């Protein structure tokens, strides 16, 4: 699992270190999309209250980091943060959770990845994973 987590960290740092090289697009409603040189979305950021029908959005902003696979866009890392709190969700290629870091910084590793519904039993922040998937659909009009 540590190898997979490191792969996700490398993806995160690659995106963060190249933000100034990516094309930025205003998606409206507090959403910003970042495109690499091949036109692929590598990051989407959502400001607080970007999702009016999703209660945690009123308290938290989120950043989604994507890998492009043979199956298409795959959210791999979800970073959620608010006033003095942050949460980190590491996702496998099948979108299951392999690591969750809670607001206290406690690391929860899942050698057997847990589904998003199992993650929902642990935290309401899980809904941001669903939004990560929906953002790709919204970015391309459906």
Image (tube, rainbow, N blue to C red):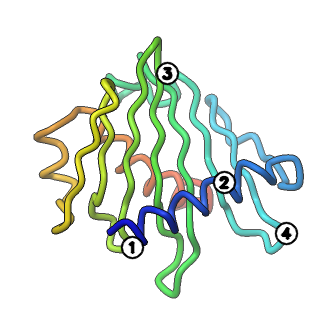
Residue projecting furthest to the top: 83
Report the residue marked by disc 4: 37
Q: Secondary structure at mark 2?
A: helix
Q: Residue at x 58, y 75 (%)?
A: 68
In this orientation, does residue 128 appear? Answer: yes
Q: Secondary structure at mark 3?
A: loop
- The location of residue 4, given as percent across then percent down, is 41, 70
Q: Which badge, 4 or 1, is on the more N-terminal residue?
A: 4
Q: Residue at x 56, y 54 (%)?
A: 65
| Depicted 10 relative to depicted 99: above or below | below
Q: CA distance from mark 4 to mark 1?
A: 23 Å
Report the residue marked by disc 2: 13
Marks 4,1: beta carbons within 8 A: no
Taking the image as shown, residue 69 lies to the left or right of residue 3, namely right
Marks 2,4: beta carbons within 8 A: no
Marks 4,3: beta carbons within 8 A: no
Report the residue marked by disc 1: 93
Q: CA distance from mark 2 to mark 4?
A: 17 Å
Report the residue marked by disc 3: 49
Around disc 3, counting alpha carbons within 10 Å, would you say few (fewer than 14), some (14 to 19), or many (20 or more)? some
Residue projecting furthest to the right: 21
């Amino acid at each position: 699992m540590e190898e997979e987590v490191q792969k996700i960290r490398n993806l995160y740092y690659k995106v963060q270190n190249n933000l100034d090289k990516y094309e930025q697009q205003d998606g409206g409603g507090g959403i910003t999309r970042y495109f690499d040189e091949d036109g692929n979305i590598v990051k989407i950021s959502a400001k607080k209250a970007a999702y009016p029908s999703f209660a945690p959005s009123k308290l938290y902003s989120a950043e989604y980091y994507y890998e492009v696979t043979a199956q298409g866009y795959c959210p791999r890392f979800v970073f959620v943060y608010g006033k003095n709190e942050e949460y980190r969700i590491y996702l496998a290629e099948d979108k299951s959770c392999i690591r969750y870091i809670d607001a206290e910084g406690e690391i929860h590793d899942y050698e057997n990845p847990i589904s998003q519904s199992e993650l929902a039993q642990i935290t309401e922040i899980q809904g941001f994973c669903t939004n990560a998937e929906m953002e790709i659909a919204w970015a391309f009009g459906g």
